[in-house]
Amino acid sequence: MSSSNSDNHESGNRAAQVADKLVPSPPPSSFEKAYFTYTADKASKESAAKPFDIAIIGSGIGGGVVAAALQETIMWNSKNKKDGEAPRILLIERGGLLFHSHCLNAARPTKRGGYGQHNNAFYNRFKSVFKINDLTELTEKSGTDWRGGPLYCLGGRSPVWGLFIPRIHDSSLEHFPKAIATDLLHPYYEKAEKLMHLSYPDTRGIHQLLMDRLNMSKVANMNWQWGRIASEFKDEHNYDFAEGAYSTVDKLLELAMNDPEAKGPFKILLNTTVQHLLPEVSSSNPSPVEAVVVTDAAGKSHEIKCKKVVLSAGSVNSAAILLRSAKDKQPKTYGNDFGDHFGHITDHEIYHMSKSFVWRNPEDRAKVGAMKLQTYVHLPSTKDIALANISLDASSFLPRGHVKDDSHPQFIMVFMFRSDLQTGNSISLDDAENPQVNISSNASDKEKEEKDKLRRQDMVKIVEDTMRTITGTLGVQFLSETPTDSTSSGSATIQYTPLDPIALDAHDLLRLPLGAVGHELGSIPFGNHDDKKALIDTDLKLKYGYDGVYVCDLSIFPFAPAANPTLTLAALALRLSDHLMKRQSIQSGSINIHNLTTVTVEIVVTDQSRASAELPQKHRLPPGGLIPSLIRLNHEVVFVYEAGKPRYYDVLTASPGHEVYITRPPYIRD
């Protein structure tokens, strides 16, 4: 090759290299591709060298809350611990990034009416279905046509859940193990309510008047209050945005955005299905868990080593993972006691009724606005305790399809009852090792019919009394609805007439089909107050087959409570997180305080380690002065006063081992 040709060739290569640098790589086509780059193959290789400390399977209210709480503990401990490597956490989610927040924080379809929950439209659009083997006769009366199903995405079903967060009634908590019930009451219910942004609406005089009059009912003892909603509707700080409806996806997406290359100790693995655990279970004797076996989106299998596992895949899929981990794929492999109490999946018994109404004075509608109320109520005939909900001119927590889409305002009343685990129900694997839900019934038809009859009698009286109170307090007119002949287009029409007097029939109360609100639970329960029928202990640790496996989803409930179980599950998830990883106490250290102002100040530093009611010592500090080596064990408050001017003061914070700089003179406080 000639010299000139060689020069031209090298010049061409340099030009191509420059061109490559000038042409940027295409940007990611989605949030998922931008922020969730960790793969099952990489997790497998990394864990072979060093197993993950905890693998969490599922990212819904159970697993998502555990994962986020563990990450916060890791961050806390890293700030207060001088040495040691942070624990490594892996969150495995079967689905991808479908929602960026709760669906009610974004656009949603409304053309189908406004009284069924809009979030249910997304649930029905994206949910998967369980394979159901119904062993009962499918009739409207039996209500055994299961309507639930999983949602495979980051956050699980939390981006589409109904946001009601009542606490479980004390009479039901008495049937929980004492250690769990005690911890729920203090401090974990309160922590969960704070996490989930428990909010109440503004109360006007007319609202309080209605609640007071409802609570004076002689039909039953009730204590009507605002419905408890998991949503921050407004933020008190200027220019801060309210966080809106709660879901686990918000925090998990934030964590992924902060570490898109997954270099930190907390990692999220999407589009990955857990098949089973290792080693294979062949007896009830617990063996340390060693790994999870997963399948990636391409269908390739990977073994990811870990020291502990948290099963949070839901009542059906968590149970299926345990079955696939057994040598013969049967629950009895874990022991006879395990097999006797495993898989009895159950849902609440829910009755509902809705009536159209009009405002006698149309201007009152805007003054009163929408109302959602709730109370626990004792039914006189059956001694049942039910959670009753009222939605007045507001969306109900009922799914769409169970609330009529109507141009008139709606009054909707719902009763939710506790249900014992249905021992006739079970979970098994089909030939492809996919879960199958087998539905049966415990009670005889005669027994169920008699209880249903008594319940309806009591509920009708309560609904009638409630409607009369609303009529007298708010000035509304309830309407009777009579279907008329079909129009020429083939659609039926409704004729409305005043419902006067208010009189209902027992069959105006309809029963929701099982699974309609997505609360199937109880397949791996922690047992009742005397620990009978427990498959997991009070720390939510599996008692059979494995050591180091925990369960934290709806499968752990020993019965279906008369309440939405989401708040309780979130509280138990926070409790499990604290059990798995303790927050390190702050190391004691010295606090040095520097006065960088031009005035003399007096300093008081709190000391939370002292039980004495006496105030801590006051220190006088001239301009440029230093108070060295104040020893403290906790975060403390520093009160700064201008000498001789007690109304001039400022407030700072101090931490052991850190400097405090006073950079401005204290100012007057009114």
Image (cartoon, rainbow, N blue to C red):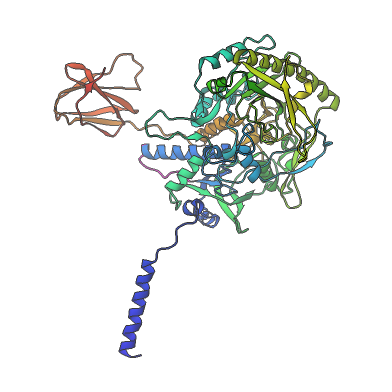
Q: Position of residue 450 (x, y in %)?
A: 82, 21
Say whether residue 177 is visible. Answer: yes
Q: Position of residue 348 (x, y in %)?
A: 70, 29
**Left or right: 265 in relation to 524:** left
Q: Position of residue 656 (x, y in %)?
A: 31, 31
| Majority secondary structure of magenta residues | loop
User: Split into 4 quadrants, where in the image is the N terminus?
Assistant: bottom left
Q: Position of residue 137 (x, y in %)?
A: 84, 36
Quadrant of the rendered image containing residue 44: bottom right
Observer-nearest residue: 428 or 584?
428
Say whether residue 278 is visible. Answer: no
In the rendered image, the residue lying farthest to the bottom is: 2
Magenta-drawn segment: 80-88
* Up-down relation of residue 497 to residue 245 (above or below): above
Quadrant of the rendered image containing residue 63: top right
Observer-nearest residue: 19 or 258?
19
* Up-down relation of residue 19 to residue 560 (above or below): below
